Amino acid sequence: MFRGAAKTISAVLLAATALGGTALHAQETVATYLSRIKAIDKAGPKINAVIALNPDAAKAEAAAKALTGPLAGKVILVKDNVETADPMPTTAGSLLLKDNRTGRDAPFMIGLRAAGVVVLGKTNLSEWANMRSSQSSSGWSAVGGQTRNPHALDRSPCGSSSGSGAGVAAGLAWAAIGSETDGSITCPASLNGIVGFKPTVGMISRTHVVPISHSQDTVGPMTTSVRDAALMLSAMAGSDPADPATADANAHKTDFAAGLATSSLKGVRLGVLRKAVGSNPKVIALFDKALADLKAAGATLVDIDYTPPSEMGRDEYTVLLYELRTDLAAYLQSVPASSFKDTPPARTLADAIAFNKAHPEELKWFGQNEFEEAEAMTDTAVYQKARANSLRLAGVDGIDKLLADNAVSFLIAPTAPPAWSIDLVTGDHSIDVGMGSLAAIAGYPHLTVPMGAVEGLPMGLSFMGTKWDDKRVLEAGAAYERARTVAVPKPSLKRWGE
């Protein structure tokens, strides 16, 4: 599969994953990451995780040498629905925004830069963060094409933070930024065999991030270790006057990495969501091994018989449709006209729908039924009732009640199923595993940590807690990470089964 320099890069990649990334990443530079991107992202296996490169990355790296701290000089990739001040567009994967160069940094990016983080480039994503069509293929966008899973090139990387997950797994950067509305950090982290953390909604500003839903959207770190995710969160968290959801963030901002090295599960009661495991025997066996490791580390496991009520997901969908129409319009109207070469092509969702109809390359593989449903969702009373009900069912009567009734600190479950085959014709198809929608709808923290693989396909273990419990969730995940006895798979850079 590899020829010439690509063989060398592949060997370096496999050495990095064998070390869990930490030792080798400490020696990595912008130049070595660029070499790896050239060898395995744009050539060789063509993972296609990186959608744009920052021409100022080397300059930023040179400036970072003057800084100190754990993030100084760390090279990251950023999901391409997040604005950065670098000379790269923010496209959300859509041709509509291919020239969207605002020159603005999302506020959390300012914190990362102050800590010395270097932005290498942008990552591909499921177009419009996977909220355009119910028949989409995760990891496909009109701007970036199809991202592939480095563990099995013909298998899905999940989405919508597909390029961020695949890029970190393939060693294309030290870490990446993802965003989530429901599963868009945790699912690609799980399928790509890395750590992903969706913080409490409101812990990190969403200003200058292309939105779906102000009720559920958040950004978060995707890394090779829980500690790295905590370091990133420490720099990203904080209140932003332009984002009302973050009003209390400063009160909960802390050094999220402090104490992780000695965190313990001894005496910690964990609620096991058995119905989130599904019926696949190999998935069950892998989850049982994770439970055995947790028990050996001193945790008390409490089985919980819980099935999410169907109206929770129904009402969530209503919320996402209503807020997509209003929130996307607000974002598009905030974009300076000077960001585009010509007249800005859209200021409303209706404009985006019309643009897609006029550009057949956008609708080549699937349509835009969710866009069209969102445009028609205008009943404010119906929306408000749906939001109140879905939030109650997932939060107070969901996670909070399960924690209290069972006297447990966290809920655990497999994060997502093993990666399914990429299918651009009929879209995603997977088995029913995981229960992350609870944390997504409630806006509560959700951490996924690699727990091994099924037939070479990675799976993650989820830790979910209550609102603002981010640090304790990270501590529990770090303790499991140390206690894990199952080997974490290395990317094969081949098709599944080869």
Image (spheres, grey):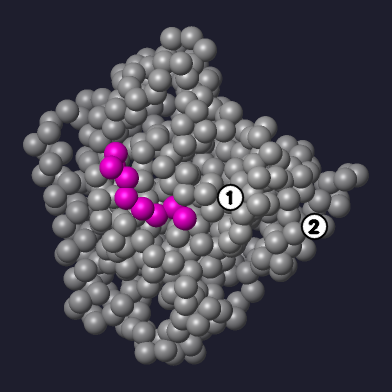
Tell me what residue is drawn at x 44 percent, y 74 percent.
Answer: 475
Displayed quadrant of residue 422: top right
Seen in the picture, residue 246 relative to 209 is either above or below; the reply is: below
* Residue beneath disc 1: 117
Task: State the residue at coordinates (31%, 63%).
Answer: 252
Query: What's the residue at 11%, 38% (across, down)?
Result: 382
Residue 358 drawn at (x, y percent):
44, 12
Farthest top residue in view: 342
Q: Quadrant of the C terminus?
A: bottom right
Q: Is residue 258 in the magenta section?
A: no
- Answer with mark 2 or mark 1, whichever residue precedes in sequence: 2
Q: Nearer the viewer, mark 2 or mark 1?
A: 1
Identify residue type, mark 2. Val
Which class describes the residues within 10 Å of circle 1: few (<14), some (14-19), or many (20+)? many
Q: Amino acid at mark 1?
A: Val
For the residue pair 428 and 344, the one nearer the viewer reads as 344
Residue 432 place in picture, x, y as percent? 40, 58
Identify whether 283 is placed above or below 392.
below
Q: Is residue 263 above or below residue 124?
A: below
Residue positioned most to the front: 66
Q: Which residue is mark 2?
A: 12
Q: Residues within 10 Å of mark 2 (few under 14, many from 20)?
A: some
Q: Which residues are magenta?
A: 235-243
Q: Is residue 350 or residue 286 the one in the foreground?
A: 350
Q: Is residue 410 above or below residue 41?
A: below
- Kindly identify the residue that appears in the image at 60 percent across and 43 percent down: 119
